[in-house]
Image: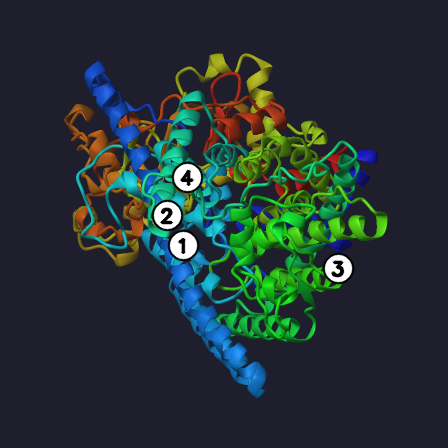
Amino acid sequence: MACCRRCLCCQCCCGEGETRTPEELLQWTILGETHGEDEILPRKDYESLDYDRCINEPFMEVLDGMDNKKARKYEVVKWVVVFAIGACTGLVGLFVDFFVRLFSHLKFSVVEKSVEACTEKGCLALSLLELLAFNMTFIFIASVLVLIEPVAAGSGIPEIKCYLNGVKIPGIVRLRTFLCKAVGVLFTVAGGLFVGKEGPMIHSGAIVGAGLPQFQSITFKKICFNFPYFRTDRDKRDFVSAGAAAGVAAAFGAPIGGTLFSLEEGSSFWNQELTWKVLFCSMSATFTLNFFRSGILYNSWGSFQLPGLLNFGEFKCSDSDKKCHLWTAVDLAFFVVMGIFGGLLGALFNCLNKRLAKYRMRNVHPKAKFVRVLESLLVTMVTTIVLFVASMTLGECRDLSPPTNSDNATHVSNSEDVNSTIKTFFCPNKTYNDMATLFFNPQEVAIHQLFHQDSTFSPVSLSIFFVLYFLLACWTYGISVPSGLFVPSLLCGAAYGRLVANILKTYIGMDHVYSGTFALVGAASFLGGVVRMTISLTVILIESTNEITYGLPIMITLMVAKWTGDFFNKGIYDIHIKLSGVPLLEWETEVEMDKLTASDIMEPNLTYVYPHTRIQSLVSILRTTVYHAFPVVTENRGNEKEFMKGNILISNNIRFKKSSILTRAGEQRRRSQSMKSYPSSELRNVCDELVGTEQAEEAEDMLQQMLERRHVPYPNLYPDQSPSEEWTMEERFRPLTFHGLILRSQLVNLLIGGVCYAENQSSATQPRLSYTEMTEDYPRYPDIHDLDLALLNPRMIVDVAPYMNPCPYTVSPNTRVSQVFNLFRTMGLRHLPVVNAVGEIVGIITRHNLTHEFLLAKLRQHCITI
């Protein structure tokens, strides 16, 4: 009963709960949305990737022809492609950074001149209008680009996390998405919204990794090269992992952190070879971006001074200040407390953003597309007005202290760079406006100010800045523009950390406190509380600071922030993944789920094919189902009596197949009914010859008999008859021996390629398709509804055995859910057949059968049954 009570508890952010019956949960999980009261459409949006190799005959022919020389050539090509992915990702980062700097410099230079002139003349409203014009123009362009490709909205990290988890999201790695993302994010960042370009960089790198090895484009048909390698989900997902890691490396100058990010954020399959390739790709991205940025910005080609788009600068006390320390053991206690508050703030941020996302899903997304553009413009207008008014009315004029007298001084050159970006708006000479310095600078510059500014920021200004930035960043994330969350979270957390340092200095008298360290720890705590990453984020921040001594404070802060935040809700990316309905598989199942077995969660009603199946039957199956794979089975009529001697088969069949007795017969009737309208002229001619001048109704009956009869050298094409109450136990539970799996795309390719033979011929006369021909349309295989059925001969027979996967992973019906889950996720499977002790398939397990909602519903049913 305790189990049942725990299962029936609804856990949700901020305490809201939704109660569904187990049946409703099953329908929601498997079938997706409910349209109306009765109509439930199958969920077709999210298809699993297939990481398991299909060891069929075409693949074995390629493997047999692969000698050592060809294998080495293949490996060299893969390394070259990995390097190209990293270099291209670095160039993408260079492109985005260059134009963001260009547009931001243009905007701020015009507005600053206007503010300086209008401060004396009293025309600040004109300056505000100029800033609004710049920002709203940029955001309008970004929103229009998202209308062209809606998948380009947001950071893209949740979608890439799903892809690495094994879910194929439509359009997520297309070239059009890449163009809209890369161009849109530079306008979004330049438009003054509280977003970052680092998240979209990860998405852009993943798209480069997915598309570059294919040497073809669906968006631009003319980009098509004869390159037959890497045409599998297995290779493509490895390259996506490398591209995502390269995006992190280019964004933060952290190649090791990028590798760990790709590992931590969802890659279900990993090995030593992949680790080395991903790290090499990250290195190439980092050094490509570093080489060009150092040369363009400092005219110092080859000096490698700027490793990433976001550089935290050097944390170092001056030699003259002997009391200054980056951090001490006493500070660790404050870091733990900051981690707790960072986790709380991150949980609050995620909760508010979740409510906003639900509101958008109900009230904004169903409306016309231009409403999303208006929402983006509204957020831009409010953000611009708030930062302008806050800088003008709430900022304090602070004295700029010389670097040598600072308690936390850094290098003079670094201080000069930071001091050159201060803003003196509305302040007299030798003072600066602390609020305007944070609002009227690019976000990366504002982070530098909080990390390295020698002079102090007013606690009141830091508090106001934190609250405004927190609320506006929460409102912004989720609108229809390309946007990242790393930089806003870092900036918001840095203000929180700098505020803590000011309080410790002013009110507690801890003069040794290094404000930059507390700002960094605050940034880590808030970012960790929002995204809930640990290992990869620790290494990213260490690499970004170039200070290994920060490893322990950052690690402790991130762990505490994650534990605190997880007590209330999940990370922001997991929340948005769940809201979008993507069947993401977690790292492992809950302990209580082991009360279930594979037989409890599998789908028992199967649509299957025989090794030798007529074209009319294949077409009927493909046109009347949405399944992506079909078991290949035979009926063991000759040996069924020996199989039935034991009680195991009978009990298993009664337990696992009783509910599908009528389903098998209904499937045959459905196939026959769907073939009545088959447009093949040959089938109609045969029908006409058989019936002669009889009535049309009799012709249909004759056609039905022809479709249902058994064709004698192929006795297993169709069952003899439908089940009836007079059948014996042996007849009722005739076993279906499992031989393998064949994919929908493979069956369609066989039909297109004319792979079939006539009834009076041997299957050896059937044409053969090579591995290259089977994969040339990857990843967009043709659909059965695109075929011209008039060109197919329905009486021809297809031998599917050479093209099926004869050795897929299988599990027993009694296998526990945790074992099923680990096998499915670790091996990156798409379908997992359930086969009993005598080789009969009794069900199949897909990704949707392993989602938390589905397992929870099944556990509720299990508890109720007990």
**CB under 8 Å between callouts 4 and 2?**
no
Residue 609 seen in this snapshot: no
Q: Position of residue 373 (x, y in %)?
A: 48, 72
Marks 4,1: beta carbons within 8 A: no
Quadrant location, the N terminus: top right
Query: Of residues 199 and 498, which is closer to you in this image?
Result: 498
Instruction: Report the front residue among 617 and 228.
Output: 228
Closer to us: mark 4 or mark 1? Answer: 1
Callout 1: 10 Å neighbours few (<14), some, many (20+)?
some
Name the residue tied to disc 1. Answer: 97
Tag in front: 4 or 3:
3
Residue at the spot of label 4: 246
Which one is closest to the eye, mark 3 or mark 1? 3
Disc nearer the start of the sequence (4/3)? 4
Occupied quadrant, residue 142: bottom left
Position of residue 262 measured from the top left corner of the image (x, y, whole percent): 49, 36
Estimate the spatial distance between the alpha carbons at disc 3 and disc 1, rounded to whole Å: 32 Å
- CA gap, disc 4 to disc 1? 16 Å
Going from N to C along the chain, the mark reached first, 3 or 1, is 1
For the residues carrying marks 1 and 2, which lies nearer the camera in this image? 2
Task: Please determine whether, in this image, residue 11 is positioned above or below residue 51.
Answer: below
Instruction: State the residue position of label 3.
Output: 459
Q: Identify the amino acid type marked 3.
A: Pro
Left or right of 76 on screen, residue 256: right
Q: Which mark identifies residue 293?
A: 2
